[in-house]
Image (cartoon, grey):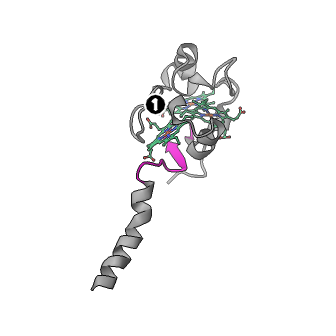
Amino acid sequence: MRLLFVLIAISLLPVVAQEKKAADKLTFKAKTGDVTFDHAAHSKRVNEDCKVCHDKLWPESATAPLNYKAAMHRTAETKQISCGFCHRPGGTSFESKGNCNKCHVRGAKKG
Ligand code: HEC
Ligand code: HEC
Ligand code: HEC
């Protein structure tokens, strides 16, 4: 009986340890093709400095609004918010214009 408890406790450990960590990849649904956001790669690029994005750009949530889609991303780029904080003309990464398919992938993953 005691052994069983130990085994259950051990099997639960990884779940507890991951609780505060986001999934490596988050998928955002879009009619124009779903977008895979590589959370792990993005974190690594800013040396795991969570504060670059949380909670300044978004709360640590998988369901809170991204506030990115208005006016085909132009609003976020102009205001330098959401993904447009970096993904904009003159930003640290590619702007939306001309790069739709770097983020939006049609077909393949549809269920
Ligand atoms: C480049 C920006 C960025 C960085 C850096 C970043 N995150 Fe996130 N994170 C996001 C985005 C975007 C979401 C989704 C927000 C939404 O859906 O509203 C998210 C969601 C999350 C979630 C909820 C998702 C889930 O799977 O439950 C957690 C937890 C989280 N982040 C933790 C962290 C931690 C801890 C760090 C630092 C190691 C970090 N984030 C660094 C952008 C970032
Ligand atoms: C803190 C700055 C920052 C934020 C915020 C950010 N990105 Fe990125 N993103 C980058 C950088 C830097 C790259 C690397 C590519 C490059 O050099 O242009 C990148 C690359 C990407 C790529 C190419 C695949 C990859 O990960 O290499 C996708 C897709 C992407 N970002 C989507 C998003 C989405 C969607 C959001 C908002 C939910 C977002 N990014 C927010 C900085 C950012
Ligand atoms: C940096 C990544 C990225 C780029 C580049 C990008 N998008 Fe998006 N797009 C997203 C994300 C993430 C969402 C989901 C936003 C949300 O849920 O608020 C989205 C949502 C949308 C939506 C809303 C779809 C719906 O179902 O409501 C449209 C329309 C759209 N994008 C069009 C475009 C077009 C057109 C381009 C090229 C000019 C483009 N996007 C470039 C990441 C990107």
Between 46 and 3, the one nearer to me in the picture: 3
Task: Kindly identify the residue that appears in the image at 40 percent across and 72 percent down.
Answer: 10
The answer to which image quadrant residue 17 occupies is: bottom left
Confirm or reject: label 1 Cβ below 8 Å from ligand 3: yes
Q: Quadrant of ligand 3?
A: top right
Is residue 105 among the parts visible in the rendering?
no
Task: Say left or right for 54 vs 24.
Answer: left
Image vertical order of residue 20 relative to residue 58, above or below: below
Task: Kindly identify the residue that appears in the image at 50 percent across and 50 percent down.
Answer: 23
| Main SS class of the magenta portion in the image | loop
Image vertical order of residue 110 relative to residue 10, above or below: above
Between 38 and 30, the one nearer to me in the picture: 38
Q: Within the magenta stretch, is there residue 89?
A: no
Q: Position of residue 8 (x, y in %)?
A: 35, 75
Q: Which residues are magenta?
A: 19-34
Q: Within the magenta stretch, is there residue 23?
A: yes
